[in-house]
Image: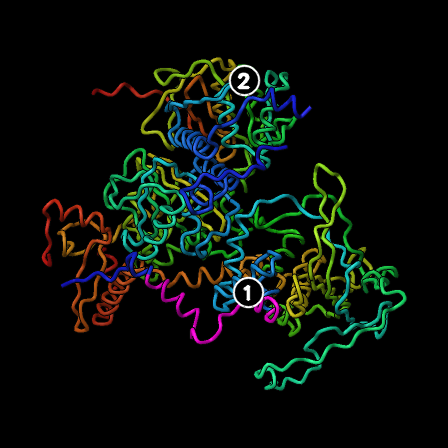
Amino acid sequence: MYVAVKGGEAAIDNAHRLLAEIRRGDPAVPDLTVAQIREQMRLLVDRVMTEGSLYDPDLAALALKQARGDVVEAVFLVRAYRTTLPRFGATEALDTGAMTLARRISATFKDLPGGQVLGPTFDYTHRLVDFALADGAVPEPAAEAEPEADAAACPRVTDLLGQAGLLEPSPPDDGAPVGDLTREPVDYPADRAVRLQGLARGDEGFILALGYSTQRGYGRTHPFVGEIRVGSVELDFTPEELGFPVSLGTVDMTECQMINQFHGHGAVPPQFTRGYGLVFGQGERKAMAMALVDRSLRAAELGEAVVVPAQDQEFVLAHCDSLQATGFVEHMKLPHYVDFQAELDLVRRLRAEHAARTAEPDEPTLREAAE
Amino acid sequence: MNAQVQIQVTASPGTGYNFAYLDEGTKRMIRRAILKAIAIPGYQVPFAAREMPMPYGWGTGGVQVTAAILGSSDVLKVIDQGADDTTNAVSIRRFFTATAGIATTTRTAEATVIQTRHRIPEAPLAEGQVLVYQVPIPEPLRFLEPRETETRQLHALAEYGLMHVKLYEDIARHGHIATTYAYPVEVAGRYVMDPSPTPKFDNPKMDDCPALQLFGAGREKRIYAIPPYTRVRSLDFEDHPFRVQSFDRPCALCGAEDVYLDEVVLDDAGGRMFVCSDTDHCETRRADGHTGEAA
Amino acid sequence: MAHTLARQLAHGFADPVHEGQAVFRAAMEALSRPGRIRPLAIALTPPAPLTPELAALALALTDADTPVWLDAPLREEPAVAGFLRFHTGAPIVASPGQAAFALIADPAGCPAFTEFAQGTPAYPDASATLILAVETLSDADGPAFAGPGIRGTMRLDAGPLPADWASRWAANQAGFPLGVDLLLVAAGRLAGLPRSARPAAPEATPCT
């Protein structure tokens, strides 16, 4: 007798209960706290905040716990929470030049005002598994830096280059409202602010691969790392009723300014151009890849031919979002038997027609004429 | 101070969310898009789709449209593949039961709002009903031209030659049009529209339908509509007129003919049976005493 | 100042969620079935000459994202803009061409449709919706319409309207998919006329 293979409410409930149990794992192992994730899985928390477009380390840590460590699922939880939050307005633009630095490096100058600050980095570590960590080794306290006389003077490398006219100026604030792709559908061609927003929210792996492709010849941009800076920045907001900015606190950010060779065109003299990356927390890989792709997406504006994927803003913006991608890829799990039935019917018909043609090689013309 | 700043919470108790989940500002934005979609039948209105608490591709567009139109006296039916009890249909129905506290039904005739994925119910729809389609790829020209900037121009110029070329290539290759679902239609003599991945069997039901048909694509951020009693023509050629699929047997459970059937594999020895894809239609018929060969 | 304003201000929807939904659904039905007159029961008492029906549609459909244009009689009474700004947050614009919605208390003096946003060939939805408060609204006589949402033909008579109304509408419809859409409100009633509604010869009364 026919038994319909269909899910019911009970099956869904049971699946969710099983998920909760599996998420907890062996009850003999202590439950992971949100604070532990926030403190000890910080780079993961930073990535979830960046791609989730919401600066809330505790929420991102909780999302990671709920998602069993699945980054895309955690981003999804944060985004779905974010949509329901009331909006009070937009903050003033961040002044990353006034960042309290934890790390600051430049690949274009050996030394520069403010110096090179390595800070906490995996760079130059030997990637040898540290088995002592498995036994809960307590790290040595970090060395304290000597307070510098002019600690405040740490200008952005791009500002130093810009003074000499060697680097294109940062576009002036035209006062036009900044687009928000979470509030308006993207209208192509999208301006740079909207593109940067899309890239910041974009999946790290996807942006990384695209940035990498530009280095391998798919739209070469001759990039140099002008500067990467990591640290905390003051966030200012001007409430309508006050009319002057008040500080909301600080956020940790990573900023990457890429400097790219440019031969000039028409009236524009040869000068270096910019690619920009900015993410929450410490996320150098994403910020660098974002800066590479940002520069590539400026192709049309700089008079370059749009020929490779990283230069094609519709391709990049329509496919960089991990939630859109994962949703649509994974929706293939949903039943499609109505469409499949239609295709099954067609393939059977085409096969029957093919078989008839093969059996009687001279027939097709006649059959068609008869139809 | 502005009244809009006050957060209105009128939900079914205990959810902490607004009635039907979406905030009122988002609903207004979607409602305005729906009104323009109705005024320009078949044209895809861009809208700022929100990130919903279910994945893209699983009905976020349909859910947003339903959430924006739903009122407390509505009776909601949700189907997927024609069935009320498939997992995603159950999940979406529960979402609205939890967030809007509205009545639900599996009976097509009792519903005021029907959200669907991949089918149009077999029972004729009536005035006063709204059919909300979940749409994955709203752009009928997308697989012929991937760029939005290009397809937008083609719609603006009503330049649909590409689509006819594609269908004609099918005929040249196979002797007939090989598109079996998401079969393109022309709405009210102007816009070519994707009917969502319904089998072309359902296309004729869209034409001159007494109910309002709304289409929501969340990931692609588009809403479009077919008002009631609107001419919906499946694209075809004079020498190759549009034809729907037909099944050479009735439903094995209720004996219905001229309905869309699911093929069910019974064993690994080639055993098959064909049953109504529309579960409500099948159950209603069986309750009325109709039987098929397997019942 | 704010205190005085608050005291003088007429209230908005008592239940914004459900009243807003009901008004939207009426508008959706009205535009879906052009010319068919729908009941619209409103409990608002907005400052005159803003009618309860105009106010209800404004509250249901407009907000900070929708520039609103007011016709001369509505502009002349400052309490109208005050009411709308407070309850909707919608920016009130001086030029009809900037408006997403136009509220019109004197339909006989309605500016030419072409003064309002028509949309563009790429984005025909970027066009205005005009909400006109008429005194009379009838589907028993008046010009006939055909098109999407209409089974056969439908008649709709409203007044007072400008003398060249018929030619204005014919021109608006001829520009499809560009053009403006109308919502016509009278006391307790609503009808819609989307740009898709074509002027038609009235059908002979069917033998029933």
Of marks 1 and 2, the one in the foreground: 1
A20 within the magenta span: yes
Q: What residue is drawn where x is 77% and y is 71%?
A: A105
Q: Amino acid at mark 2?
A: Ala
Instruction: Read off the residue under disc 2.
Output: C105
Position of A33 relative to B75 (above/below): below
Give coordinates of residue C3: x percent, y percent: 65, 24
B147 within the magenta span: no
In this rendering, do the residues under marks 1 and 2 share a single chain?
A: no
Q: Amino acid at mark 1?
A: Val
* Chain where mark 2 sits: C
- Mark 2 crowd level (few <14, some 14–19, many ≥20, 10 Å Cα): many
- SS state under label 2: loop
Give coordinates of residue A23: x percent, y percent: 43, 69
Give coordinates of residue B150: x percent, y percent: 54, 51
Q: Is residue B278 visible?
A: yes
B93 or B258, nearer to the observer:
B93
Q: Magenta residues?
A: A14-43
Position of B115 relative to A253 (above/below): above
Mark-to-mark CA distance, 1 and 2: 58 Å
Give coordinates of residue A261: x percent, y percent: 77, 67
- Mark 1 crowd level (few <14, some 14–19, many ≥20, 10 Å Cα): some
Q: What residue is drawn where x is 23% and y is 58%?
A: B262
Q: What residue is drawn where x is 57% and y is 46%?
A: A183
Q: Quadrant of residue B171?
A: bottom left
A142 or A103, nearer to the observer:
A142
Q: Is residue A201 left or right of residue B265?
A: right
> Dominant secondary structure of the magenta stretch?
helix
Instruction: Read off the residue under disc 1.
Output: A34
* Chain where mark 1 sits: A
